[in-house]
Image: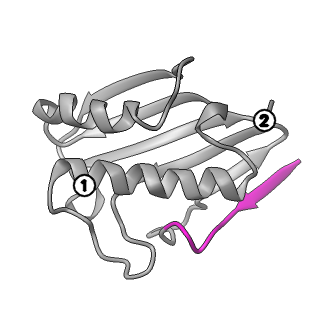
Amino acid sequence: MKIIINTALAPAPIGPYSQAVLADNTLYVSGQIALIPESGKMSQASITEEAHQVMQNIKAILEEAGMSFSNVVKTSIFLKNISNFTLVNEVYGSYFSGDFPARETVEVARLPKEANVEISVTAVKK
């Protein structure tokens, strides 16, 4: 069973993909950047603000699927500048309590819309 997850509380996709796909009990959330859902503009006042917007976008998608950050089992973080690792890590960590998911963080040359951070997650219904 495959269900497309979409919410107006997260930014609309900027390409031919879905915000998330639920396959059986596993939710695959597409990479999120700091687009503000209401305006479609980037939130880039600081890397901290950008990371919070990314996490809020992910939260909205998780909630639309009936999940929360406690359901997340794997994340991927893409940073335009690895020197932002500590700041993004602090924001990211504030959305989880205990039992952190598996994760990788990599530096990349560029991200869509000149984003500084992009995060994707995989979550499983309990």
Which residue is at 46% across, 38% downward? 95
Q: Is residue 43 left or right of residue 61?
A: left
Query: In the structure shown, which secondary structural element does the residue marked by tag 1 occupy?
Result: helix
The reply to whether callout 2 and callout 1 are in contact (CB within 8 Å) is no
Q: Is residue 115 left or right of residue 1?
A: left
What distance separates the C-alpha of mark 2 from that of mark 1? 29 Å
Nearer the N terminus, badge 2 or badge 1?
A: 1
* Chosen colour scheme: one colour
Q: Nearer the viewer, residue 17 or 82?
A: 82
Could you say which quadrant of the image residue 74 lies in? top right
Find the magenta span and give its range.
1-10
Residue 49 got which mark? Answer: 1
Which residue is at 48% across, 42% downward? 120
Q: Nearer the viewer, residue 68 or 30?
A: 68
Which residue is at 36% across, 67% downward? 35
Q: Is residue 103 magenta?
A: no
Residue type of the residue flagged with mark 2: Lys
Q: Is residue 17 above or below residue 88?
A: below
Residue type of the residue flagged with mark 1: Glu
Q: Nearer the viewer, residue 65 or 113?
A: 65
Main SS, magenta residues: loop
Q: Is residue 75 left or right of residue 22?
A: left
Of tags 2 and 1, the one toward the viewer is 1
Query: In the structure shown, which secondary structural element does the residue marked by tag 2 occupy?
Result: loop
Where is the C terminus found, in terms of image quarters? top right
Location of residue 6 in the rendering, given as x and y in whole percent from the top left corner = 66, 66
Q: Is residue 47 above or below residue 19?
A: above
Residue 125 got which mark? Answer: 2
Which residue is at 18% across, 49% downward? 47
